[in-house]
Amino acid sequence: MPETSNKLTRFWQELKRRKVFGVVTTYAAAAYIIIEVTNNLAIPLHLPDWFASLEFIILLIGLPVVIILSWIFDFTPKGIKKTESVEESEIKEVTGKTAKRRLRPSYVLNAVLIIAVIVLAYPKIFKQDRLEKLRSSGERISVAVMPFRNMTNDTTWNIWQTGIQSIFGNYLSNSPEELKVRQAETVNDLIQGEKLTNYASITPSIASKISQKLDADILIYGSIKQAGPKLRLDAQLIDSRTQETLRAFEIDGPAEEKSIFQIIDSLKLMVKNFLIVSKLTEEIPSGLRITGSISDSPEALRYFMYGSKAFTSRDYSSARDWYLKALSIDSNLITAAVYSAVSYANQGMYEEGEKWCNRAYEKIEVVPLNQKLLIKWLHASYFETPYEEIKYVKQILELDDQRSLPYYILGVKYNELQQYDKAIPEFKKALKLHEKWGLKPVWAYYYEQFGFAYHETAQYRKEKNLYKKGEQDFPDNDLIIRRQAILSLSQGDEKGAKRYIDKYISVRKEYSASEATIATNLAFVYEESNLPDKAEKYYREALVSEPEDPYRLNALAWFLIDKDRNVKEGLELIDKALKISPDDYLIIDTKGWGLFKQGKNKEALELLEKAWALKPVYDHEVYLHLEAAKKEAAGQKKN
């Protein structure tokens, strides 16, 4: 037994003398660095999935080879030499020919490798701390989901790039207490701002840049790959600030569209559990867990994506056609009904819009929270007041405060309520986000509505500077030019006003606007500028051009009545308009307001109540007229 122990001791000492442990450590460090570098370059270089496995096998096979070579050979200052035997080493020690200890290249190499390993391993070891820090901060983790890049070379999978992104976003939004999910449309707007030719060109650095613009803590960066009959989805959770991968997931399945939802559901569940911690999910009663996709039909989802593209381009008619196709396949695709209702409202087709609004509202209990709030806002816009709209929009912003459209809607609603001091900060937030992203707003209405709020609060210098920025984003836009004309007239700059008015007329004619339409808009410019004589002149010119048009009759009648210029003539004109369009709530409101001005309170109240009942959506001006008539009637009763 002592002899065996002695042999083991001598073998151990021989291993140390031949520096086998040092060589193995150096080899392991070098192998780790090679693996890490390969992992970081795999996506940019489009390396196949089997490359990592092959690399690992080769490095593993190389280990025993290195051990054997380190036993036989040694690195010396004079080059690689066969390792001396124990006897030769002992003779040198006796004769005093042992070389002095000096700095050897191997020491330098080992030091470099150790430093490199520490640099690469540190984020891996401590990356959980980043997520734990976010979790323990008390703030919700903000997440940006990138489009899943189609790496299959098969364009039929392109639609799933944004399809999977949308599914992930909706699913993660069901955890508003833990996660704040940036909306897909905002992410994709910023991607377009990078001028990429396709989503496959999105690199981790570009994704990180976009996520940082959205103040997202973590980005989800995924891809779609195919190998024969097998489809693979992978998703990486990346720290937006450091670009370090916190966790990577992948799942395989059949390369068939009918099977992709099962793959997506499995992958998104893995991602969500990692982000939120499984314990939180387990605490939710099973009956309340929402794990389904926005649609179970690949074909319906494809049509929905086509419709969404048309909607963002403001081609509302085409958008509705795609949405109808999607809904004909999957009647539970509620988001398509929501966007259809919005598109009808944007075109003033409220009756049709109400049908889609009600259809969406019927399914409100089965949709994710972000869509639930969207439906509630839509329902409020059709059937309630701006106060309810404001409440729901604010709740939408609690889920994701990096969206400009909700801020814009808040500003518009405050303008509608004549609460301009509240509107201004919301418009500022909307434009500040676009400035941060380096993108212009979707519509010129951002500047037009913001400028109106500035004008009503007499902040003319800020209004002027705002329009300068608006001109850069929307050159030759009639809305901005019209507001500039109003501002110039309000400040007494007649020369500047003439320049803007001439430009406005030119732009409107370029888009084939009628003479009556142009005249009506010029009347509005002068009315807003407190120049009633010129305003009346243009209202009359518009009516001469289209004498049987109820809108032209109502425009002049309203002006004469509301400005107390000629209430009697205004009522005569409105009676003509009512013969042509007897159920138009605006025309009825104008007559009711005219009778109120004449002191005919009973008749006025009846008409104003009728106008209120006929209105398709909330109208604050009609509300104010009705309240004034009610107040007057109540006062008369007391007397």
Image (cartoon, helix red, strand yellow):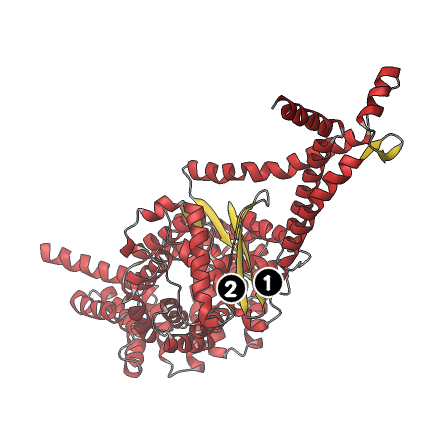
* Closer to us: 620 or 121: 121
Q: Residue furthest left?
A: 638
Q: Can residue 232 be seen from the camera position used here?
A: yes
**Other residues around mark 1 within 10 Å, as few (<14) / some (14–19) / many (≥20):** many
Q: Position of residue 102 (x, y in %)?
A: 83, 22
Q: Using the image, tell me which numbered label, if any, was put on residue 327.
A: none
What amino acid type should be assigned to the residue bearing mark 2? Thr
* Element type where label 2 sits in the image: helix
Where does the N terminus fall, quadrant-wise? Answer: top right
Q: Based on the displayed image, in which of its 4 quarters is residue 333 positioned?
A: bottom left
**Residue at (10%, 54%) from the top-left corner?**
638
Q: Using the image, tell me which numbered label, if any, was put on residue 162.
A: 2
What amino acid type should be assigned to the residue bearing mark 1? Tyr
Q: Based on the displayed image, in which of its 4 quarters is residue 620 positioned?
A: bottom left
Q: Position of residue 269 (x, y in %)?
A: 42, 55
Q: Is residue 491 above or below residue 108?
A: below
Q: CB of mark 1 within 8 Å of CB of mark 2?
A: yes
Q: Is residue 286 above or below residue 331?
A: above
Q: Is residue 248 left or right of residue 359?
A: right
Q: Specify which label sits upstream in the sequence, 1 or 2.
A: 2
* Element type where label 1 sits in the image: helix
**Residue picked out by circle 1:** 199
* Closer to us: 297 or 494: 297
Q: Position of residue 589 (x, y in %)?
A: 27, 69
Q: Based on the displayed image, in which of its 4 quarters is residue 24 positioned?
A: top right
Q: Can residue 479 be seen from the camera position used here?
A: no
Where does the C terminus fall, quadrant-wise? Answer: bottom left
* Closer to us: 422 or 633: 422
Q: Position of residue 211 (x, y in %)?
A: 55, 50
* Closer to us: 151 or 217: 151
Marks 1 and 2 sit apart, C-alpha to C-alpha, by: 9 Å
